[in-house]
Image (spheres, rainbow, N blue to C red):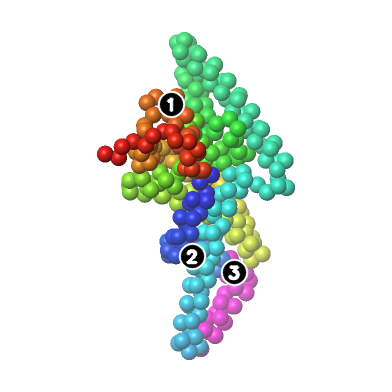
Amino acid sequence: MLDKFWESLGGRLADRWAATLGPAVVFWTGAALAWLSRPDGLTTLRAAAERLARQPAPAQALTVVAALVAVAASAVVVQRLTTPAIRFLEGYWPPPLRGLRRILTDRARHREEGMEERWLQLKARIDGGTATVDDRAEHSRLESRLRRMPASGYHLPTRVGNTLRAGETRPMSKYGLNTSALWPHLWLLLPDVVRAEIGQARAALNAAAAAGIWALAFTCFTPWAWWAAPAGIGVMLSAYLLWLPARAEVYADLVEAAFDLYRTSLYQQLRWPLPVDPQQERRTGDTLSRYLLRGPDDDNPAFDDPR
């Protein structure tokens, strides 16, 4: 739900492409090695180097600049593909995959129901004093896994999708706050150090997705070098099965923590009266979300005196 916000923010930072050149340089270095692996690779390289050496200095400089521009352009292209890739990995699939999405979403929901039932059984043993060490360890593992599942009705077909959706929907369950509607408002109120932490977590998430894109593209060099396919597939699987889920957990935790710690800043800045208990907060949070989404629909609540 927050992808559009980060896509917009990333678009404003796209001019700082130098920070994204590292993966591009690694990719094209690997491409050069794959090309040199051909039987005539070294011979062709020597011939190209000799032709470049015979060119005037301006032509040589222009060739180098063109190569750097190509590397930078590829980095920007991958950067632009990162957000669509994350959305696809979350489970936002096109209509032809709607049936598969429904099957996997139902499977995730049923798996959560089974984990919830088992968690309750283990909790009863722990509360009753009959739990073993293995029971407590299993209870802890289930609690961690259940934390990565969103509220009922918000499930997605993938692990990454459910992890991010859990972090985005939990403020709604706890405080009645619509995360996607209020996130830009809260972002402007967060201290610089908090925004830096969340920004770094999002950048790490994007970097993991970008690594998978680079790795997938690297498999295109298999006709030149047989090892390009296993290398690309290995990195891609590592990115999508290990790096991306771990970084999604960090980012989701920080988004939730931002609402936990700074949601009252929204009320104060908008001059809304602070709720006095959790039940009232959920009602007030829902009203505040609708107020910012669609404007006021009545005269309540009265604004607090700014003094």
Q: Nearer the viewer, mark 2 or mark 1?
A: 1
Badge 1 is on which residue?
280
Disc 2 is placed on an element classified as helix
Q: Is residue 28 above or below residue 177?
A: below
Which residue is painted at 50% across and 80% down in the image?
Answer: 63
Which residue is painted at 49% across and 85% down in the image?
Answer: 59
Quadrant in which the C terminus appears? top left
Report if residue 272 is visible in the image.
Answer: yes
Q: Residue pushed farthest left?
A: 307
Q: Main secondary structure of the magenta part?
A: helix
Badge 3 is on which residue?
35
Q: CA distance from mark 2 to mark 1?
A: 54 Å
Camera-nearest residue between 84 and 107: 84
Magenta-colored stretch includes residue 50: yes
- What count of labels does the image hold? 3
Magenta-colored stretch includes residue 188: no
Mark 2 vs 3, N-terminal side: 2
Which residue is painted at 39% across and 34% down in the image?
Answer: 302
Q: Quadrant of residue 117?
A: top right
Residue 210 placement, left or right of 262:
right
Q: Which residues are magenta?
A: 33-54
- Residue 304 point in image, percent of width and height: 34, 36
Within-10-Å neighbours for mark 1: few <14, some 14–19, many 20+:
some
